[in-house]
Image (cartoon, helix red, strand yellow):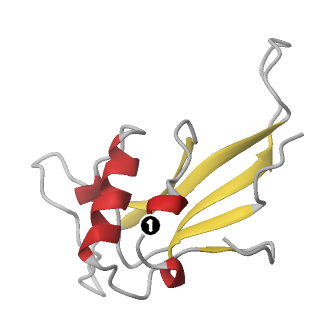
Amino acid sequence: MTDAPIALTVHDGHSTLPIPQQQLVVGWLAAHGIDADQVSADHVITVLTVPYRPPADDGTPWLIQIIVFHQMYVGPDGARELDLLSRKPVAFQRTVPLTVPFPTAQATDAGDRRQDDGRAP
């Protein structure tokens, strides 16, 4: 079991983050091997605690934290694919194991982060 929050919203998908907060998120994503240029700013970025059953009994905890985000689909030519009808970039949901906690203590705007389990950040 973990004492981590059930969910942490890193970006709500509706607002533009202030520059210091953007830099914080970009660095945090990079620490997980995620190219921030390919992450959709129109979707929520969340850290969730989820049940996990390891493939083998290797001592891995049964609850893990993951980052949930939407990544832009890039075609073979390196360009973002656009939906034929909406002409918006095609994005797909990804999950990545959390290895570096989001640095909430360093964040500049508490309004852009909130713990969705009712606790104060």
x and y percentages locating residue 54 in the rendered image: 79, 24
Q: Is residue 15 above or below residue 93?
A: below
x and y percentages locating residue 63 in the rendered image: 82, 40
**Residue 81 lies in quadrant:** bottom left
In the foreground, 67 or 2: 2
Q: Is residue 108 above or below residue 50?
A: below
In the foreground, 78 or 42: 42
x and y percentages locating residue 87 in the rendered image: 23, 83
Q: Quadrant of the N terminus?
A: top right
In the foreground, 88 or 22: 22
| Left or right of 12 in this view: 86 | left
Instruction: Kindly identify the residue that appears in the image at 56 percent across and 52 percent down.
Output: 67
Instruction: Kindly identify the residue that appears in the image at 53 percent across and 61 percent down.
Output: 104
**Residue 88 lies in quadrant:** bottom left
Residue bearing the label numbered 1: 107
In the foreground, 17 or 34: 17
Q: Is residue 55 among what the camera can see?
A: yes
The three-letter code of the residue at mark 1 reads Ala
Q: Is residue 8 above or below residue 30?
A: below
Q: Is residue 73 among what the camera can see?
A: no
Mark 1, other Cα within 10 Å: few <14 / some 14–19 / many ≥20: some
Instruction: Kindly identify the residue that appears in the image at 66 percent across and 70 percent down.
Output: 121
